[in-house]
Image: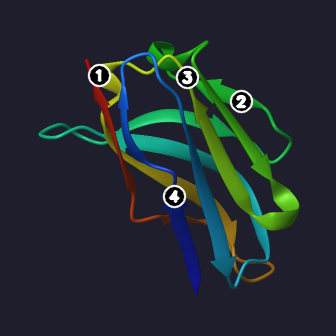
Amino acid sequence: QVQLVESGGGSVQAGGSLRLSCGASGRIFSTSSMGWYRQALGKEREWVTTISRTANTYYTDSVKGRFAISRDNAKNTLFLEMNSLKPEDTGVYYCKGVIVTTPGMAPLDYWGQGTRVTVSS
């Protein structure tokens, strides 16, 4: 099957930076869009950013100008550069890949297990 594994989370002070990575492995024929979501304690998971296979990027308003998503298609790896972090960025960050495992089959969503980001004031 397909596995997505995030890394790079941690604890930083407000104004600091972190770089998250997400590696996809397994039975991957092709990967369409990939993205990052986050979930704060007691809140629903929310979309943060998406990148298409052709590197078009989209961001939720609260992270525009501070976060940058990128990907390495050859290595099936997704990145999230997070700068000027704020306490409200705290949460568990999940990567999602829209992946085709078998030619001719519809793409499916695959999720990682998440990596925790804590931003202190």
- Quadrant (top left, top right, bottom left, bottom right) of the N terminus: bottom right
Q: CA distance from mark 2 to mark 3?
A: 17 Å
Is 104 left, or right, of 109 in this rendering? right
Q: CA distance from mark 3 to mark 4?
A: 16 Å
Query: Percent from the top left, x then y, of residue 103?
Result: 81, 80
Would you name the residue on which mark 4 appears? 7
- CB within 8 Å, label 2 to label 4: no
Q: Residue at x 55, y 76 (%)?
A: 3
Labelled disc at residue 83 = 3
Would you name the residue on which mark 1 appears? 88
- CB within 8 Å, label 4 to label 1: no
Dot 2 or dot 3, earlier in sequence: 2
The amino acid type found where label 1 is placed reads Glu
Would you name the residue on which mark 2 appears? 57
Q: CA distance from mark 4 to mark 1?
A: 20 Å
Q: Residue at x 52, y 43 (%)?
A: 36
The amino acid type found where label 4 is placed reads Ser
Query: Percent from the top left, x then y, of residue 38?
Result: 37, 41
Residue placed furthest toward the left: 42
Q: Residues within 10 Å of mark 4 (few under 14, many from 20)?
A: some
- CB within 8 Å, label 3 to label 1: no
Q: Residues within 10 Å of mark 1 (few under 14, many from 20)?
A: few
Please name which of the two marks, 2 or 3, marks the residue nearer to the observer: 3
Label 1 sits on a secondary structure element that is helix
Please name which of the two marks, 1 or 2, marks the residue nearer to the observer: 1
